[in-house]
Image (tube, helix red, strand yellow):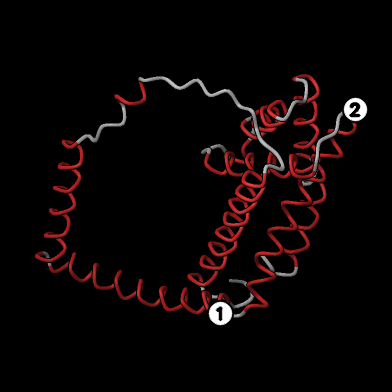
Amino acid sequence: ERVGVPAAGAVSIGMIDSFSGFCIQLLLIMIITISGLATLNIAADATSSSDSSSGIDWETLLIAFGLLAIAFLAALLVPRFRTMMKRFLDGLRDQAADGRDALKVLRHPDKLLFLLGGNLIAQVMLAIILGLCLKAFGYSATLAELILVNTFVSLFAGFMPVPGGVGVTEAAYAAGLIAIGIPEAAATSTALMVRLITFYIPPTWGSFAMRWMREHRYL
């Protein structure tokens, strides 16, 4: 927004980048798994109790739909609410137009290549960092195994409602390394080192970058 991008366009750009990263992660998992380059041997303890909790709570759904219907009628019948709803819809249309402008990037093959290629390079670089940390403790793994572990960890941590994936990501890295045959002690140490290098230390110089960006009104 500081450089003139509308709010809706800025949100759309962030969503496009996140979605392209998600697509690259799924594609990497599919290619590596189907080709047999690497596998994760994770023992799954499935329980039948999950079947009983998968039923649909119809009473809750009916109550939710009833509340939505009441809110919709209030918006239509009460003039004040109707005016507020009209303003909201008008603003939503303007934001949708800005969002469509941001989506035009998908029509340019070169920009799409940069978008997907950048996310692919990021995944490979993180896998290489994971391999170097693993090497420091006297163990090694193939690039395919490292990419598979890192990609699974990224997806798993992304779904967890924990800020920065603190604790969750470390445990996922350790579990992933153990699944490819790394001893538990080395896997845990590697997981902690990877997070130290890629997450906990960067804010040290990131604070200087943040200050510079604020001084030059980039943030």
Nearest the viewer among 130 and 36 is 36
Residue drawn 61% across and 80% down? 108
Name the residue: 16% across, 63% down.
75
Give whichever of 31, 114 is nearer the camera. Answer: 31
Which residue is found at the position 68% from the left and 28% from the top? 179
Quadrant that contains the N terminus: bottom right
In this rendering, position of residue 92 left or right of residue 176: left
Residue 171 x/y as whole percent = 65, 28
Amino acid residing under circle 1: Arg
Residue at the disc numbered 1: 107
Q: Is residue 161 left or right of residue 134?
A: left
The residue tagged 2 is: 138
Picture coordinates of residue 79, whole percent (x, y)? 13, 69
- Secondary element type, mark 1: helix
Q: Mark 1 or mark 2, which has the lower sequence index?
A: 1
User: Is the residue under label 2 in contact with that under label 1 (CB below 8 Å)?
Assistant: no
Q: Position of residue 87 (x, y in %)?
A: 28, 73
Give above or below for 93 relative to 61.
below
